[in-house]
Image (cartoon, rainbow, N blue to C red):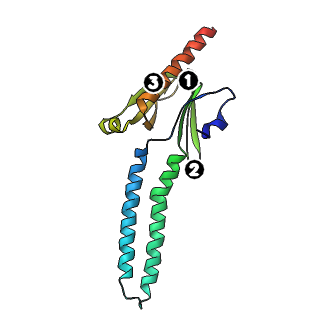
Amino acid sequence: MAYPQDVLAPDERVVVHEHPHWKALLLPALTAVLVTAVGVGSWWAVLRTDPDEPWPTVTGVAVGVIWTTLFVWLFIAPLVRWGTTHFVITDRRVMYRTGVLTRSGIDIPLSRINSVQFRHGFVDRMLRTGTLVIESASEDPLEFDDIPRVERVHALLYHEVYDTLGEEEAGR
């Protein structure tokens, strides 16, 4: 939970801090296995050729460079992107930060939230993940995909919004 601490107000409290669900890494992991299998098969085919020929070395290096490029692009980059994506609910706001080289984010004050919804299909229910939909006062609804334990997050966010509204009404 180290990331959001540097962007919080002194008395702000973190309620939820999540990365996207691990299912977001499933396709990149399967792709990495496939790319590795094709790379190993290609490299093995190159090794079976006549070692006196000059092209097996060049082809072997090319296979290695192509495999490394694809592995980094199709697996390492999504893994780093996943690790640098943060969905945070505090007692004052909802924060969403994403990006590696170019960071982007949004903060929604709890007092501006009109409604909170969640959505998940059959597979998402089995994996205990889903989409959280937050409708704020002046914008189109924001959808946050692959939120782990989305029903629990929905309930916590609803309670935080309700508590914030109750505090504002008590202060009047």
Q: Quadrant of residue 70?
A: bottom left
Whether the residues at callouts 1 and 3 have beta carbons within 8 Å, the answer is no
Identify the mark at residue 110; answer none if there is no mark: 1
Labels 1, 3: front one: 3
- Neighbour tally class for label 1: few under 14, some 14-19, many 20 plus, Cα within 10 Å: many
Q: Is residue 144 left or right of residue 2?
A: left
Q: Nearer the viewer, residue 133 or 13?
A: 13
Q: Which residue in the structure is indicated by mark 2?
A: 100
Residue 114, image x and y in percent?
Answer: 49, 21
Alpha-carbon span between mark 1 and mark 3? 14 Å
Residue 148 appears in which quarter of the rendering? top left
Q: CA distance from mark 2 to mark 3?
A: 30 Å
N-terminal-most mark, 1 or 3: 1
Inspect the image, locate mark 3, and give the three-letter code of the amino acid beneath it.
Ala
At horizontal 53% and vertical 21% (from top left) the residue drawn is: 160
- Residue at the (45%, 83%) spot, across then down: 57
Residue at the far bottom: name it: 52
Residue that numbered label 3 is attached to = 155
- Residue 98, given in percent of the width and then of the height, sits at 54, 43
Find residue 129 and name its label.
none
User: Which element is circle 1 on?
Assistant: helix
What type is the residue that disc 1 sits on?
A: Leu
| Residue at horizontal 45 percent and vertical 27 percent from the top | 154
Residue drawn at x 57%, y 50% is 100
Q: Mark 2 or mark 1, which has the lower sequence index?
A: 2
Could you tell me the amino acid type at mark 2?
A: Val
* Chain-order first, disc 2 or disc 3: 2
